[in-house]
Amino acid sequence: MPLPRATTLAHRILADQIPEGSCVVDATVGNGHDTEFLATLVGDSGRVHGFDVQLAALQSAKERLRAAGLDHRVRWHHGGHESLADQVDDPLRAVMFNLGYLPGGDHALITTAATTLRACSSASVLLVEGGVLSIVLYRGHPGGAEEAQAVETWILGLDAAHWSVARYSPLGRRREAPSLLLASKEPRLA
Amino acid sequence: MPLPRATTLAHRILADQIPEGSCVVDATVGNGHDTEFLATLVGDSGRVHGFDVQLAALQSAKERLRAAGLDHRVRWHHGGHESLADQVDDPLRAVMFNLGYLPGGDHALITTAATTLRACSSASVLLVEGGVLSIVLYRGHPGGAEEAQAVETWILGLDAAHWSVARYSPLGRRREAPSLLLASKEPRLA
């Protein structure tokens, strides 16, 4: 069996981090794969906020969630995730990013470092203690390596006393395969 | 919930990789934690080979496995894992290493790069196609960083056409926490 992809590993790890009733964000809805995963975890008492700039992506993701009977758990936001702080003020248990372009979509429409970092920064504020930020990074497309580097630099700049950070990355021949960055906001002692 | 430790993540990933009936190796038995995990997975039709240089560790691990009703699935080898190729000639589905010293044991007794690399090299030959090598590395003790670097260099030297490799590592403040290296032997096309 092959080693898990970054996207698969993100699901494995987040499944333990998101109890029913949580409020979470899918910052890059795309095909809705992560949205569906999150909607399953949060249950009927929870909420997923889903962001995408591409209306066609949102519509097909909505269709996917409707087919799974989960669309009532999702609030859809047609717009970039950099508007996260304006659109959401619930305390968040998890925020997921799957960067790059939409598979099967317009490859010229990519996430970029400036808006990604603005969204990450908002996410870091909105996350509850014990909450987790999960970011899948792609280096293979033009601009991907720069965005990945910017996100890594940003994440290493988080207050080390209150965040723990880890990375899962393919090495060698597969070093351009997606990697996963995780940051967990640690509870502050009273 | 904190991010998973390297040892926890190794178990999560290997649980999908080791079907019942497999033959596997715990190259560093220590307290028997990995041995018990492996013995549970392989079932009564499988086999775990467990290596340790410390007789006291082997004895307490045996006791642990006996208490769990799993000791009949384990063949114990009192000796260094560098003798792997002499002791085992079964095709292996997985080989686990948890390097460094035995917690609660003699901290002067550590694994070292030379013998670790000899064992890794034997493991890479004995693994079946689809088999996986899992190595938890510690940088915090004297000699740890050098051993970790030697193992990483070795693993990146595996034939890229037939191996995929990944690393899970804590970053920032926790960068001396254990990291996990994984190498999966890919099936050769006919």
Image: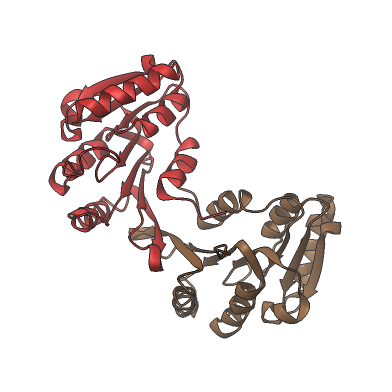
Chain colours: A brown, B red
Indicate the quadrant where residue B125 lies: top left
In the rendered image, residue B55, in percent from the top left (x then y), is placed at 20, 25
Residue shown at 25%/46% (left/top)? B100
Q: Relative to B78, is B39 on the left or the right?
A: right
Tell me the quadrant of the picture where the C terminus of chain A can be found.
bottom right
Q: In the rendered image, is residue A1 in sight?
A: no
Residue shown at 23%/30% (left/top)? B52
Q: Relative to A185, is B131 on the left or the right?
A: left
User: In the depicted view, which residue is nearer to us: B69 or A29?
Assistant: B69
In the rendered image, residue B34, in percent from the top left (x then y), is placed at 38, 34
The mark tally for this picture is: 0
A161 over B158 or under it: above or below: below
User: In the depicted view, which residue is nearer to us: A43 or B1?
Assistant: B1
Residue shown at 30%/41% (left/top)? B103
Indicate the quadrant where residue B175 lies: bottom left
In the rendered image, residue B168, in percent from the top left (x then y), is placed at 41, 55
In the rendered image, residue A73, in percent from the top left (x then y), is placed at 82, 58
